[in-house]
Image (tube, rainbow, N blue to C red):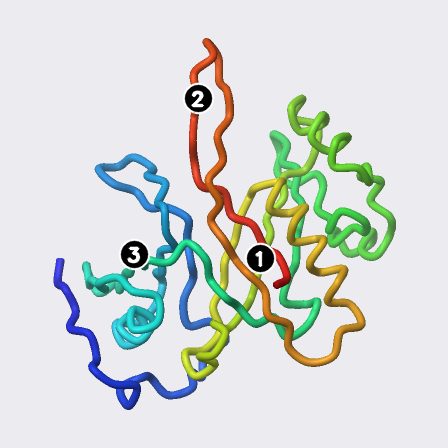
Amino acid sequence: MTVLALPLTDEHLPLWPTAPTTGRFYTGRRKENRPESLPSWRLSDTTAETASAVALVLGGLPTLDDGQADLVTRSAVLPVVLDSPAAVSTELRLWGPKGLVHHCDGTLFLSPSDLRGMPCGCPVSAGERSALAKRLQAPQPETTVSFRLAGHPELGRFEFRSPSRLFADSAAEVRSRLVGATGDTICRLALELVTVLVSGGAELSFRAPRLAID
């Protein structure tokens, strides 16, 4: 693993990227072949130049391993810019023994083509969706947020994806507020500490992502 040197001035920031996405943010990583939750955001799927530039903004020391740049930042909150409701999307999928059996956005079918755009029949309330999910009868969400870092548009467009139902709910609230908005909207993409009780009365703490408008 190689530790990358940080650029010293903003003159070294990368030029506006030509690719649609210059990197993806994650809430954790795999360490010794086991998942590890992190207290701050991690950037990966990016170039060494972009990782070094983001480190100037969010802290951390970028590394390069097998040609893959990686950065565990020092920031648990990302100030992000969303430019339209399309910057936040959630797709829900239910898989069966023979493959995909349900694919929607929570309101309308996304596939197959003969059903696309028709009502999907999913429950409206989060409580109903959660109850069905516990019985493995509800499609699982994947929410994607496409954003730029506030104050640093030159770094390009980044993505964050989450399978969390709670995150899907918070993202849906933000998306509804973006409808009809003009121009860019500043939001917070945060890792919030959550503590739950598990079997035996023990407490389990972890960081959960949340999207909110400032």
Q: Is residue 161 above or below residue 121?
A: below
Nearer to us in this view, 51 or 78: 78
Image point (26%, 37%), residue name: 33
Looking at the image, do the residues carrying marks 1 and 2 touch, with CB atoms under 8 Å apart? Answer: no
Give the left or right position of residue 133, taking residue 50 as reference. Answer: right
Residue positioned 66% across, 51% down in the render: 91
The picture places residue 59, in percent across and down from the top left corner, at: 29, 65
- Of residues 174 and 139, the one drawn nearer to the viewer in this rendering: 174
Badge 3, how many Cα within 10 Å: few under 14, some, many 20+? Answer: many
Q: Nearer the viewer, mark 1 or mark 3?
A: 3
Residue 56, image x, y percentages: 29, 73
Residue on which the image places disc 3: 72
The residue that label 2 is drawn on is: 203
User: Can you say which quadrant of the picture contains the C terminus?
Assistant: bottom right
- Which residue appears at 47% of the width and 81% of the height? 153
Quote the CA–CA distance across marks 3 and 2. Answer: 26 Å
Which amino acid, mark 1?
Answer: Thr
What secondary structure is marked by label 1? strand
Give residue 212's position: percent from left, percent from top.
62, 57
Horizontal side of 29 relative to 117 (left or right) equals left
Residue named by callout 1: 144
